[in-house]
Image (cartoon, helix red, strand yellow):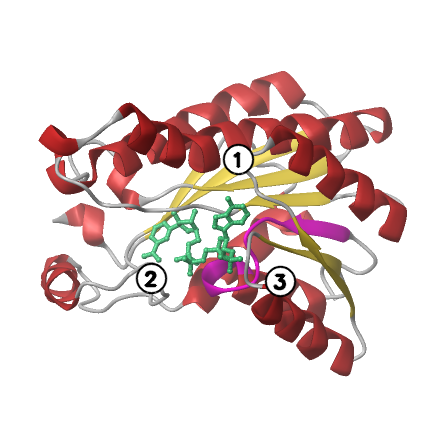
Amino acid sequence: MRLKNKVAVITGSSRGIGRSTALLFAEEGAKVVINYRERLGSAEDVVSSIVQKGGSAIAIQADISEPKDIKLLFRRATEAFGTVDILVNNAGICVPKPFLELTREDMDLVFGVNVTGVVLCSQEVAKIMMPKESGKIINIASISGIRNFGTPGNMHYAMSKASVVSATGILAKALGPGISVNCVVPGFVDTEMATSPEYVEQVISASALKRILRPEEIARTCLFLASEDSDGITGEVIHVDAGFQLK
Ligand code: NAP
């Protein structure tokens, strides 16, 4: 088991990539905090799947765009499991809108979760990890945040994910030597977020591997970055995109 007795908080783990990561981390021996914003039933299903297999997990509601919710999330996680060893900053939202129609509110909504949420969760977990001089933080960005891959119909999302890439290196410098901070950049992953069939076809034809990704494939990269196997790595950005960026 690669995460035996480690405590992991995975934001946005009631569904999609976060859910797959939570299930895999639990299989590898981690005690897992399943965070969700509104879908309690989905979060409870993840907890049940883990507990049925003999693992430990709890569900905690917290809106990652709300500072007070973030504080409560980490307080309840430490009350339940004693500490936090791993944070996966996975919660994210994508609300496409043409550039000329974008409002301040649209920007605030997406940046509140995707950027400020990442910063404040990292800050809160750093307070737990710094005294013990160890910990792993994994940020989930997106290929759309990499230069020239964003689209005009989703500029604010692309900008928010570019910020996650940028934050990774800065946080790695700020939190070393004890804490490592790395970033996974998924391509197109088969979850509820990825819905447009036309876009799927375009992505498949533009990818070297000619397919979209499964959430488990992102989860396995997160497992590598959460485990001792990646102990020499920090500030790194790993693309898991089926070769989309090669186009
Ligand atoms: P998803 O299926 O839409 O799931 C989103 C998860 O985030 C859910 O658990 C949701 O909770 C939670 N969430 C949303 N807003 C939240 C908030 N304010 N506070 C707390 N939790 C919140 O998304 P996904 O496709 O798995 O994406 C996960 C991450 O990967 C995101 O950061 C996304 O940007 C990134 N990503 C995805 C793709 C893709 O193709 N799918 C590609 C590149 C990057 P509820 O269930 O309660 O709503």
> Horizontal and vertical percent for residue 22?
62, 62
Q: Which residues are magenta?
A: 7-18
Residue, far bottom: 52
Q: Earlier in the sequence, mark 2 or mark 3?
A: 3
- Mark number displayed over residue 65: 1
Question: Does the magenta segment cover residue 11?
Answer: yes
Position of the N terminus, as image quadrant, is bottom right
* Local SS, label 3: helix
* Local SS, label 2: loop
Viewer-proximal residue among 106 and 198: 106
Left of 102 or right of it: where is 60? right
Q: Earlier in the sequence, mark 3 or mark 1?
A: 3
- Mark number displayed over residue 189: 2
Looking at the picture, which amino acid does disc 3 mark? Ala
- What residue is at 36 percent from the left and 65 percent from the top? 192
Query: Does residue 225 appear in this view?
Result: yes
As displayed, is residue 23 above or below residue 78? below
- What residue is at 50 percent from the left and 64 percent from the top? 15
Q: Are marks 3 and 1 in contact (CB under 8 Å)?
A: no
Q: CA distance from mark 3 to mark 1?
A: 21 Å
Looking at the picture, which amino acid does disc 2 mark? Val
